[in-house]
Image: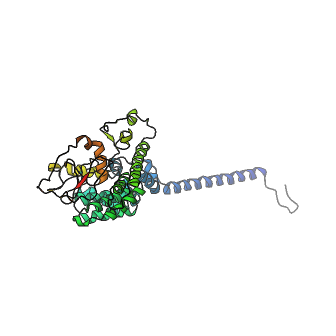
Amino acid sequence: MRTRRGECYPKVMNVCVEMKRVMKRRKIETLAGEQIDCRKKSKFAPEIAGDFFDALPDDIVLCILCKLSATATCPADFANVLLTCKRFNGLGLNSLVLSRACNRMLAVKAKNWSESAHKFLKLCADTGNFEACFTLGMIRFYCLQNRGSGASLMAKAAIGNHAPALYSLAVIQFNGSGGSKNDKDLRAGVALCARAAFVGHVDALRELGHCLQDGYGVKQNIAEGRRFLVQANARELAYVLAASPTAVVPPSWLTWTPTRHVSGGCPLLSDFGCNVPAQEAHPANRFLSDWFSGRLGNVPGPGLRLCSHSGCGRPETRRHEFRRCSVCGAVNYCSRACQALDWKMRHKAECTPVERWVDDEGDNENENDDGNGDDDNGEAMDES
């Protein structure tokens, strides 16, 4: 069939065949393009094989490790993670993770003390971890006898309002530890105790109450001192109950014992009949106790003594530094708070009066008592 110009129309069959060829060609080109795209994607996409943690970004892993270091119950919890793989070992020593470490994660045992443990604590302290600063400061000051470095580390923690560091510096000021007897600064000790009590340290509040009662480093105010002692007892009870909020209070906690305090319990509110479990000592104090208990004769050095309170562990840095019981002379304490706790927990049942006592060398320096009466404990302390 022709047109007016003499041209012929294309046959229908030819048109259909040509359209099929075009569609087939386009389909082949489309499939080829998809195969090329798949190859490119598989080339640049990360392969997830084996452990899922390999695909996690470092920020998420750091967040998990920070949570672990802040809630670990012992050093082994964190050490096992560091030993898992090289990636965890590298991220676990990140400054952000070490700065969040809690006191239980830093609770190094005296029998396991080594240069590597020293370096690890120093690494944590350099990140600004106040718990590490305090723990390492106590170890250096009392155990390694590096007084200047230990005091500076505790001062670094105290600047951050670390309550145990503030109280420990107060004890050093009260006793003149690391120096002579003339290096005592009672007013500075009272100021540090007040700051530690303000941020919630129970022993500091108790020490401050005894200082006010005795007029030791501050103007005597018996009523105010007694009020602080009652507050210390109430805070201690609140801490014990907060540690186990869902626990049922045993009847023995509220058992009236008018004769004496039940052994094994804490002396808080024992005058009113409450016998609750003793509060756990700080890992730094446990380290001191274990460090010196492993020595021959359980003494820190010739003529030096340990604080008789089992939860303290502080040693004397010079002879006759601690105050001694004026009744029996068999026990000595670094602070009035330790004396008050040990009196109600143990020493009240063991104290035996003697007419006169002298120390091992035959010297008697107990005439210069600096405010020792303690009507709350029934025991006086003499400075030896």
Q: Residue furthest right?
A: 4
Which residue is found at the position 40% from the left and 36% from the top? 254
Which residue is found at the position 42% from the left and 48% from the top? 235
Residue 50 visible to the viewer:
no
Which residue is found at the position 45% from the left and 41% from the top? 245
Q: Quadrant of the C terminus?
A: bottom left
Q: Residue furthest left?
A: 362
Above or below residue 310? Residue 150 is below
The answer to which of 349 and 294 lies nearer the viewer is 349
The answer to which of 340 and 105 lies nearer the viewer is 340
Q: Quadrant of residue 269?
A: top left
Q: Quadrant of the N terminus?
A: bottom right
In the rendered image, residue 120, in percent from the top left (x then y), is placed at 30, 57
In the rendered image, residue 251, in percent from the top left (x then y), is placed at 40, 33
In the rendered image, residue 16, in percent from the top left (x then y), is placed at 74, 50
Q: How is the image coloured?
A: rainbow
Which residue is found at the position 39% from the left and 59% from the top? 194
In the rendered image, residue 188, in percent from the top left (x then y), is placed at 34, 64
The answer to which of 42 and 173 lies nearer the viewer is 173
The answer to which of 61 and 372 lies nearer the viewer is 372
Residue 272 visible to the viewer:
yes
Q: Quadrant of residue 351?
A: top left
Left or right side of 38 for 230:
left
Left or right side of 264 for 239:
right
> How many numbered marks, from 0 up?
0
